[in-house]
């Protein structure tokens, strides 16, 4: 399984990566690869498999909502989690 994390704050990417690794270790799931990106454009240029993607809404350049829509066009089976501290993006994130 390949998981991508995209947040313009490196500390958020690193923290989420640590939590994900701990979770999968606890569940005895070994075949996990986690890749971090700090921009939506870089994530979209990734040609690898995207099973699960964690996207921040506020990114420099293309925002997480637009990146998520593009990812869903490319592969509707990709699971996307929108991560944000801003309530005003909730409706867009659920769409």
Image (spheres, rainbow, N blue to C red):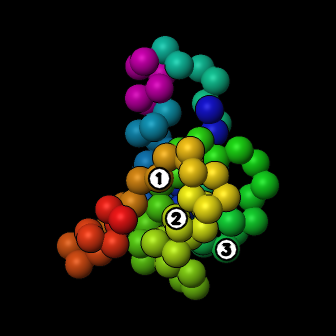
What is the span of residues highlighted in magenta in the rendered image?
A: 22-27
How far is the residue under mark 3 from the one under mark 2? 11 Å
Q: Does the CB distance between marks 1 and 2 fall below 8 Å?
A: yes
Residue named by callout 2: 68
Q: Does the CB distance between marks 1 and 3 fall below 8 Å?
A: no
- Residue at screen point 29% across, 75% down: 89
- Residue at screen point 61% across, 62% down: 73
Q: Position of residue 12 (x, y in %)?
A: 43, 59
Give the answer, above or below, for where 62 lies relative to 17: below
Residue named by callout 3: 41
- Residue 26 painted magenta: yes
What is the residue that sits farthest to the left in this orientation?
Answer: 87
**67 horizontally vs 92: left or right:** right
What is the residue that sits farthest to the right in this orientation?
Answer: 47
What is the residue that sits farthest to the bottom in this orientation?
Answer: 61
- Comes first in the chain, label 1 or label 2: 2
**18 horizontally vs 87: left or right:** right
How far is the residue under mark 1 from the one under mark 3? 16 Å
Residue named by callout 1: 80
- Residue 70 painted magenta: no
- Residue at screen point 64% across, 47% down: 50
Q: Quadrant of residue 38?
A: bottom right
Which of discs 1 and 3 lies nearer the camera? The answer is 1
Q: Secondary structure at mark 2?
A: helix
Q: Secondary structure at mark 1?
A: strand
């Amino acid at each position: 399984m390949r998981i991508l994390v995209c947040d313009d704050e490196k500390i958020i990417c690193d923290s989420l990566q640590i939590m994900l690794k701990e979770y999968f270790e606890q569940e005895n799931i070994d075949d996990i690869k986690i890749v971090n990106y700090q921009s939506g454009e870089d994530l979209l240029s990734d040609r690898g498999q995207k099973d699960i993607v964690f996207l921040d809404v506020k990114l420099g350049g293309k925002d997480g909502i637009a990146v998520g829509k593009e990812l869903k066009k490319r592969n509707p089976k990709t699971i996307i989690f929108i991560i944000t501290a801003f309530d005003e993006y909730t409706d867009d994130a659920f769409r």
